[in-house]
Amino acid sequence: MYVVEYVIGLLIVLVTIVSVLFILVLPRQPQGLEKLTVIVNKSVHYSFVMLSRLGRTYEVKDSILAPTAPVALLAQLLWWAVSLVLGFALMLMNTTHSFVHGLTQAVTALFTVGAIHIGGTPNTMLDIAAGATWVVIVALQIAYLPSLYNSFSRREALVTMLESRAGSPAWGPELLARHQLVGINDALPQLYADWEQWAAEVTESHTTYPVLLLFRSPEPWLNWIIGLLAVLDAGAMQLALNPTTAPSQTRLCLRMGFTLFNRLAASLGYPVDPDPDPDGAIKLEYAEFLSAVDNLAEYGFPMERSAEDAWPHFRGWRINYENSAYRLADAFTAPPAPWSGTRRHLRAGVVEPKRPPHRAPGSISKFADDRPEVVNPPRAQQARTWKPSRRKPQ
């Protein structure tokens, strides 16, 4: 009697335990049954994205999206609890002879000391199994949190350091321009080496623990997707403009960087071309590239090739990561930085990185640290580029 219910309940419990082990214990990309928990995280993320549409400015949207990861962790734990209660309730029907009584006994066995037996003979073994399973899951979840926050902290450290090098939001040409303006181009090889190592660590941690994708940077205009895109664009520009003098670390950083973007995009179900045609078209227009190269020329950045000659080489590098980077930036509502694609849920113009003025002792002018308000303009104005305001001293 109740054999079918018992078997179904046992399968639910086993699937839940396997999902917990793959998510919290086994360091590998979720596959198969463990993707059920990933679906829960995606549902939470989608709910917050829809809620963020109520925000008028980007800063408000970012503040609405900030709790996504903690709520997803709680929803993940709640999903496991509901699954275990349902599974054990079906298994207990063999002795309670009622699904409602089985639910009551399963809930009390999981969340309290002891169990309530409303009807039928007590099933002590299942009560003990339910309580022990839940205690182990909670303990694993507690132990899981430090690993998450350590990975998050390591990810954000280099992103924060990039603010002074590439602006806020980060942009590849701005990174090259700032290094040229202050005469520290010799620091670029180490920067590329650091970001290569960073990309390898993030690839491992964010494919193993997908919930890390939902953790946003502490500052609204800092973002790890935009930061990596800026570094890759800077490296691609340097290789395209200076093929003989560009540091060797640039090529290594680029390959590890687009490996990160493509693996994350593939893990989220986006189509990824593992071997794109280097002569294929990209979304970034040549006019945008030409404008950036002209600005670098004004700052005296050394160039071996003209913009026209460098464009095919830059395009050949960028086609490896542009599509994946744009999809990730859109999916996680990254800041609307230049060369980072559009945002379905933002509908705002591009915000250029602000650059503090070069000031010397005795200077009177002050720098107005203002951030332009990013709003949802009418669709006819979406192509507009927003520039940081600079208030003149009174």
Image: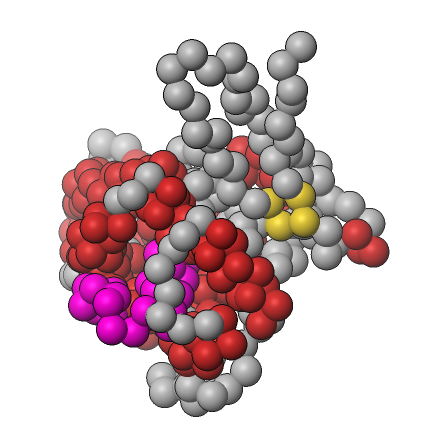
x, y percent for residue 90: 37, 60
* Front one among 322 and 269: 322
Task: Give left or right: position of 285 versus 102.
Answer: right
x, y percent for residue 103: 40, 48
Residue 140 inside the magenta-drawn segment:
no
The residue under the point 35% across, 70% down is 304
The residue under the point 61% across, 68% down is 287
Task: Give left or right: position of 351 versus 255.
Answer: right
* Front one among 19 and 265: 265
Q: Is residue 198 above or below residue 65?
A: below
Q: Please identify the quadrant where the N terminus is shown.
A: bottom left
x, y percent for residue 137: 22, 47
Q: Is residue 336 above or below residue 257?
A: above
| Range drawn in magenta | 226-252
Q: Is residue 361 visible?
A: yes
Instruction: Report the predominant secondary structure element of the magenta stretch.
Output: helix
Q: Is residue 261 visible?
A: no
Q: Please identify the quadrant where the C terminus is shown.
A: top right
The residue under the point 40% across, 33% down is 218
x, y percent for residue 27: 17, 61
